[in-house]
Image (cartoon, helix red, strand yellow):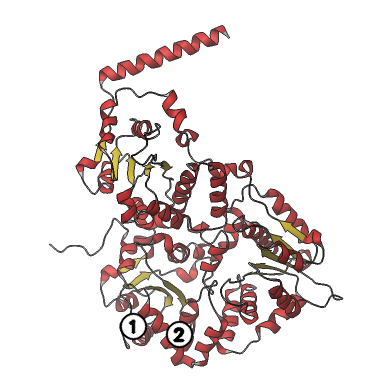
Amino acid sequence: MQLSVRRSDMGELNWQITRGGVVVLRHFDYKFLSEYLRRLHPIRMLYKYIMYKREELEGLVEFKEQSWVDVPHPFDMELFCVRLFLGFQRRGDFRANEIAAVGEGGHQGTVERCCRYLREDACLVAIKDLQSKEHWDDINKTFLLSGEPVNKGTSIIVITEDKSVGAHCVDHQQHRVFDIKKDVYTDKALERLMKDYKSCGIGGKEDSRRAHLLFHNPGDLSHWKYDFKLVGRENEVCALERQIKDPGVISVWGGSGVGKSVIVKKVYYDQMYESQIRGDENNKLFEEFSFVDVPNRGPFDLTDFSWHLLTDFYTFNPRIKEETVISLYEGHLDPIQACCQLLQQKKCLVVIDGLQSESNWDKIRDTFLPPDDQPTKGCIVVITDKQSVAGHCVVDDDRVLGVEPLTLFRHHPLTEQGPPGRLLRTSWTTRYHLVGRQEKSSWFCRGLGGVHSVWGVAGVGKSALVRDVFLDPQEPDILGNIIPCIWVDVPDPFHLTEFSRRLLLGFHHLSRNHLQAKEIAAVAIMEGQDTVHGCREILREKSCILVIDGLISTHDWDLIRNSSLSEHSTIRSSIVVISNEESVAKYCASHDKTRVLNVKGLNATDSLHLFGKVCFTLKIIRNACMIL
């Protein structure tokens, strides 16, 4: 019997992509889809998810570089190479002089640079709209068959309508060919992987820097408008909205991590959305938009800044943006002059995030802003950590907005995850007493370490049993330390980012000054900081009891284990997984029967005893009500 080379537990497409090599996706009607449906295309969703969540998917998806390439029609190998090279560039770290240097090397220099990407790093390359076997042969010969072999972890996804072209790309290995409708839309594992793709790129500075220079997703604007919820910052948002109605320079300053970028982005994208839905140019507050992250590496480079500013003006016009970046590659455009023309002729809203010094502002002001006797048409919002820089950038002090840390009451909704009792040790153990579970409770007393699982049908009392054991105040160990217990309710549907957020907030709750610690954690999450990395560091450095309640899938466990639980942390910490599924429980415990506890219903004696206690309690309550 021939064994299948596909693997269903990870999802067949996901499994094939992680193996490296060429994978083909057939979608015969892609070009006839509406723009709305195109942005929901599963491969575009997957590509965007990996782009932003690369570090969080460590162990499952390990692509260091990515490039999305629209095959030019008619086919042009030189233009294809340019698009492949530019597709690798990320907003956060591209350098204009390096791109121009590759362009000076001509076609051969571009090919060599792309081959370096493919050979040195594990890359994910998506090639959309391939129409001919001959075109694939040219691509294959140029990048895959010439010189040294590509990195074994490199995966190339070819999207084509032609069945024969798809088969040709994978040398007729049919297990590497997937039909979009039949294989991808019905892939539950892939669906779980991309459930929170809409929130990718929504956040602070880190998310902005992960975005690729030319990758365009039409739905990003509406996601910012409708899917992003800013908690506790209504006053700051309203103040900034009032300020931008008057042209000129506005400064927003505050300590690192207080949420400055997120506040400004909320206003920025709201204005961009309003501009797109208003047809009449005269009714628009702003006509053009650009958001520039000032890198904190090396000296300030005005040319790099100009290119960032210019390309971001065309974020939602991918054709013009590509033409602009190709002009940079070919050295045919002066970005400073082009930016000056836009700022002088259009009502622009420009955000400069991360300005570090007064001298850098002086360079920007002297280059792009008109003399003092000429009015400015649009607004420039400067975000900085330094109050002195904020004051230096503006003409009047009333154009400076300070952002203070969130108070407990203002960020309180962020902490409301699951029943509050799960975060309070004493409230549970002093008010409730389990009936008929003494024997099961003793199972935990043998010493845990590693991963243990508790399973049983819904409502049987699994969570109550674990809560009774681990939320009871514990005795200190031989060093006088109490091992902290972190309780995390698994979100349904599962989101790795949301799971990590809950874990991080649960850990900070255990701090001696837990209100301040949770406030810092909440703000860091709003700023777009990597919660998965934060959880990984905590579990690597701290010994703790981690309770994961409500796990429903082995795939979700793989995501949690590979992203947050290093081998070192798993050994040091005790992890208890609660699930309704026996197969999931055994899988998490590596099929070690001694690490799996099945919680069953109470026997007849204990059930009668519990029934009597409940009836007695109800009788007391009823009598008390009658007295009142």
**Residue type, mark 2 in image:** Cys
**Residue type, mark 1 in image:** Leu
Quadrant containing the C terminus is top right
Image coordinates of residue 5 in percent, x first then y, are 23, 65
Nearer the N terminus, badge 2 or badge 1? 2
According to the image, label 2 marks what residue?
81
Is 12 rendered above or below residue 412?
below
Residue located 30% across and 19% down the image: 607
Image coordinates of residue 265 in percent, x first then y, are 64, 60
Mark 2–mark 1 distance (CA, rounded to whole Å): 13 Å
Is 428 rendered above or below residue 360?
above
Circle 1: element type: helix
Q: List the single residue furthest toward the left.
A: 1
Residue 369 lies left or right of residue 565; in this view the side is: right
Categorize mark 1 by other alpha carbons within 10 Å: few (<14), some (14-19), many (20+).
some
Q: Are marks 2 and 1 in contact (CB under 8 Å)?
A: no
According to the image, label 1 marks what residue?
144
Location of residue 442 (image quadrant): top left
Question: How many discs mark residues in the rendered view?
Answer: 2
Residue located 58% across and 72% down the image: 295
Is 109 rendered above or below residue 471?
below
Categorize mark 2 by other alpha carbons within 10 Å: few (<14), some (14-19), many (20+).
many
Image coordinates of residue 13 in percent, x first then y, are 33, 64
Residue located 33% across and 83% down the image: 144
- Front one among 24 and 202: 202
Location of residue 390 (image quadrant): bottom right
Location of residue 213 (image quadrant): bottom right
Residue 555 lies left or right of residue 303; in this view the side is: left
Quadrant containing the N terminus is bottom left
Q: List the single residue furthest toward the top.
A: 627
